[in-house]
Image (cartoon, helix red, strand yellow):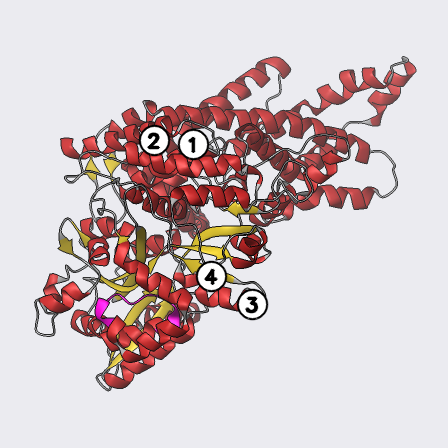
Amino acid sequence: MKKLIAVLLTACMLFTTCGKNKKQNENGNVTITFWHSFVASTIPALEDLISQFEKEHPGIKINAQYVPTGDALIQKLITAIQSKTAPDISWIHSDFLADLVDADAIYEMAHFIEGENGLSQEELSDIYPALMQYASLRKKIYSIPMEATNLALIYNKDLFRKAGYDAERPPQTWDELKTYAIKLSEDYNHDGIYDQIGFFVPVYPSSGPLSGWMTWQWIPYLWQAGGYIVNEDQTEVLYNSKAGVQALTLWKEIYDSLNLSSFTVDYDVAFASQRVAMSMDGPWNLPRFNNIMKNIDWAFAPLPEGPEKRATVVGGEYLVIFKQSPHPDESWTFIRWIIRPDVQARWAMKSGYLPVRQSVKSVPEFTQYLEENPNFKVFVDQMEVAQAQRPLDNFGLQITRHIAEAIEAATLGGMDPQEALNRSAEKSNKLLKSVQKE
Amino acid sequence: MNQQQYINRQHRKNFITGILFLTPTLVIFSMFILFPVLFSFFLSFHKWNMFSSSQSFIGFANYQRLLTDPEFWQVLKQTIMYTLGTVPLNMIIALFLAMMLNKKIKGKKFLRTAFFTPVIISPVAAALIWRWIYDPNFGLLNYATGFFGIPPVNWLNDSRAAMAALIIMGVWKNLGINMVLFSAGLQGIPDTYYEAAEMDGAGRWSKFWNITLPMLTPTTFFIMIMSMISSFQVFDIVYVLTSGGPMGSTKVMVFYMYEYAFKFFEMGYASAVAYIFFAMLAVLTLLQVKYMRTRSGYEGV
């Protein structure tokens, strides 16, 4: 009998801990669970943001929970959706949108935008169009961008001066990028391997964790040459076009002439120890670089102009509301508040991310902040030429991988760029055809 | 109550007690092994991305796609290459070490611990250390081979060298456990055989070939099967050391399966890979058991 009681008690305890997840507490406050992947350096900015929100909305509490980004985030979301423990709001990458929509896990944003507390057409078009493109799938909006990022050139001014270049004039064209890259490379000990390299071409194993990061950095070059990843109706990929070959040839030429396969892949460590003269990076690293590279004279600059145009790629994180959420309207209140111009300005200045709305540039504090932070201004200015790829409705993850395979094959594998791209395109097209058949 | 009834009751009581004792294990076994095994068999005939609540039946399409995917055959070839590279090398070195450590030498205990340590190090930590060892610029390995005038090798970025790098690490990692098993086997050989052989004037090699090796057959056989199975299933060190690169040249079967399941969310396809792979391992093990039985008459394992 005693044992039975013990067993029952344990069972009770287990159930009560499980059932503790009630969202509404006694005094009518609503708690919104918000999953994000902000790293330690951004957490103070996030806490500031949340306390500001809670001050303005006394009835709503935000419970921010950290989840590692990338594979871990999506795997955790799957488990949560299947076990009915999804958060109210989560931070996602646009890559995940198709799977979430297909599973009917998230709200279509029109539900809120057209509602009482909605967004006007003006407000909606104030958000950078490239971001809205990523926030949507099959022409419907499913998420709202929380912040923007893009890719710029980072360079070491000291090394520029040493090589006899004007430190205030980074390379402006592809040809200049190539000549600078070679001239800025040094082989100190004459062993045939460069100890200092002019331009870090980000080549990583296509099956590794940095594969998507590599593709993301290559895409601007494809656009600068006038190319596209996929055609309008998503029946065929276009990255193996002439533009794709030009972009990949540029990378391959620099990669081969600097013998980068023998260079380390930890570019930021190498940059901090003055072994890399130029590379690419995003604004999220600004706070960290300001901290760890005080003894180096470095700066950000726009990406060089391609044969067709200037372009960079936008990134950023997108907020979705789950259908499992008991408080979708309060969740929307939070999202609606985050994209208010003054909130965006405050958030951008504290976190180092870029605002998602164009009108933020006319917020006085922000204008002043831009003047004081020229590196940050480079990114904000670049938003004008920042593009989004056409969101891939199907097999987005696989097609991104195929592009990565082509980059790896042409650089590290020494394959002809056209052949490498064709091989990958063949695989992508096979997948796209399988969708059409269904 | 007659005696028969009493015995029946006693039997039933024993049966219930037995079941009760087994319950925890059975529950855990069914939840974490039996259910996933059966569920993935079910999945291998379906299309499912893990998000949606239902799976759509597609018959043998996953298996068909799998057998016509050139990458699958490439990956299979690489998995076999890894196994052929690690297992014999591992066994030869392990046997050699076991024989050395079976003699009376100084620092025996220290050496035994040193050789066994890699087995208990977390594979992820070990692979990270080996990444530094293999670094083309600052790595220990190139530095060491440099003394012998060997030109630096770009271990992890050269598709020919990467598999060798993986094999070297794989051998190093699992050497200890096989060494211990061989040591146990060696200690089980009675000294009288060696004494008799010495009387007949047998030399060192002759004793090794005619006594040690045949007497070790059960151990060798056990080690061979276990090492082959574990090398076929290698994943963690590949994931950390090379991530399947460069150009997919170190992609092995479990890595390939993992990619489809948890990167592309094609659970059905990944399950089909798992089942084909399972069938291959089962056939391989059966063949080995059969061969060893006819050859040595050994019935164990």
Q: Which residue is mark 2?
A: A421
Q: Which residue is mark 3?
A: A294
Q: Are marks 2 and 1 in contact (CB under 8 Å)?
A: yes
Callout 1: chain? A
Question: Quick one: label 4 or label 2, which is nearer the N terminus?
Answer: 4
Callout 2: helix, strand or loop? helix
Number of the label disc, if any, that sits on residue A299: 4
- Image depth: mark 4 or mark 1 in front: 4
Distance between the alpha carbons at the discs numbered 4 and 1 = 30 Å
Q: Identify the amino acid type marked 1.
A: Ala
Callout 1: helix, strand or loop? helix
Assess disc 1: are there few (<14), some (14-19) or many (≥20) residues with their C-alpha within 10 Å of its C-alpha: many
A417 with respect to B56 (left or right):
right
Distance between the alpha carbons at the discs numbered 2 and 3 = 41 Å
- Image depth: mark 4 or mark 2 in front: 4
Distance between the alpha carbons at the discs numbered 4 and 2 = 33 Å
Q: Which residue is mark 1?
A: A410
Question: Quick one: label 1 or label 3, which is nearer the N terminus?
Answer: 3
Q: Quadrant of residue A315?
A: bottom left
Number of the label disc, if any, that sits on residue B142: none
Distance between the alpha carbons at the discs numbered 1 and 3 = 36 Å
Question: Quick one: label 4 or label 1, which is nearer the N terminus?
Answer: 4
Range of residues picked out in magenta: A349-360
- Residue B210 horizontal/vertical position (percent): 77, 15
Callout 3: helix, strand or loop? loop
Is residue A212 in the magenta section? no
Q: Identify the amino acid type marked 3.
A: Lys
Q: Are marks 1 and 3 on the same chain?
A: yes
Residue at 25% across, 51% down? A388
Q: Is residue B244 visible?
A: no
